[in-house]
Image (cartoon, rainbow, N blue to C red):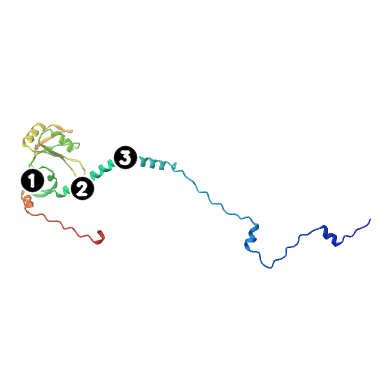
Amino acid sequence: MSTQSISPASASAQFTYPAAAAPSYFPVPFHLQNAQYTAWTAAAPAVPVYNAIYPMPQVQQAQQLFQKDSKIITPEALATVKAAIANSEKDKKVDATKKAVPRKAAGQSWEDPTLADWPENDFRLFCGDLGNEVNDDVLAKAFSKYPSFNMARVIRDKWTGKTKGYGFVSFADASDLTSALKDMNGKYVGNRPIKLRKSTWKNRIDLEALEKGKTQPQKKIKLQKRSVLHK
């Protein structure tokens, strides 16, 4: 058996070897070094999308209340509120111009501003034993049948609002007072029979103080000057 010798030239022809990369004198740029890797970017989080009308019960109730209020608040209602505010301002101005009537009884003197609401030179009837259910309207309805009837008022406690058990009825004619005293005394007004008598309110007026108030000029109240910060 003969052996063949293989020369180095033939061996190199049969087998090929990759050539080693020649080292470069200059370094490879950074952006070229990362070119072989796939670029990866983080995905932006999805933004939630909500409907125009939220299904929450609180939001639905708020929308229903808003729609209900928009129907109630009408231009007519606003005009009524403005008129009521204007009337209240007028009432405040009228109350400021009223003069308190000086009174005197049992050695004491005081001023009663409520007497300024009553007509002058009227004939007044005292109404006693009134129940708490009797108000000004109930008392006025009982005596409004008389032609010269002016007004009626039930006296109440300013803190509790409960009636003090009496009131007054005003007439312009003395004959109507006499007729009412005769016809209505002991009749039921509300849940109780009413007790009537002629009022003696004029006897308690401090005439001397009243005359002094008429002759003496009223002092003008000086208003304090406001500072620059309160303009």
Depth order, front residue of 231/145: 231
Of the numbered discs in the image, which one, if any, rests on residue 204?
1
The quarter of the picture where the N terminus appears is bottom right
Instruction: Quickly name the residue at label 3.
Output: 72
Per the model, the C-alpha gap separating discs 3 and 2 is: 25 Å
The quarter of the picture where residue 71 lies is top left
Tell which tag, 2 or 1, sits nearer the viewer: 2
Residue most extreme to the bottom = 25
Per the model, the C-alpha gap separating discs 2 and 1 is: 32 Å
Which numbered disc, 2 or 1, marks the residue that appears first in the sequence? 2
Depth order, front residue of 128/32: 32
Instruction: Quickly name the residue at label 2.
Output: 89
In-image side of 48 versus 170 (left or right): right
Mark 2 surroundings within 10 Å by alpha-carbon count, few (fewer than 14), some (14 through 19), many (20 or more)? few
Mark 1 surroundings within 10 Å by alpha-carbon count, few (fewer than 14), some (14 through 19), many (20 or more)? few
Estimate the x, y position of residue 4 in percent, counting from the top left: 90, 58
Kind of residue indicated by mark 3: Ile
Estimate the x, y position of residue 8 in percent, counting from the top left: 85, 62
In-image side of 173 versus 85 (left or right): left
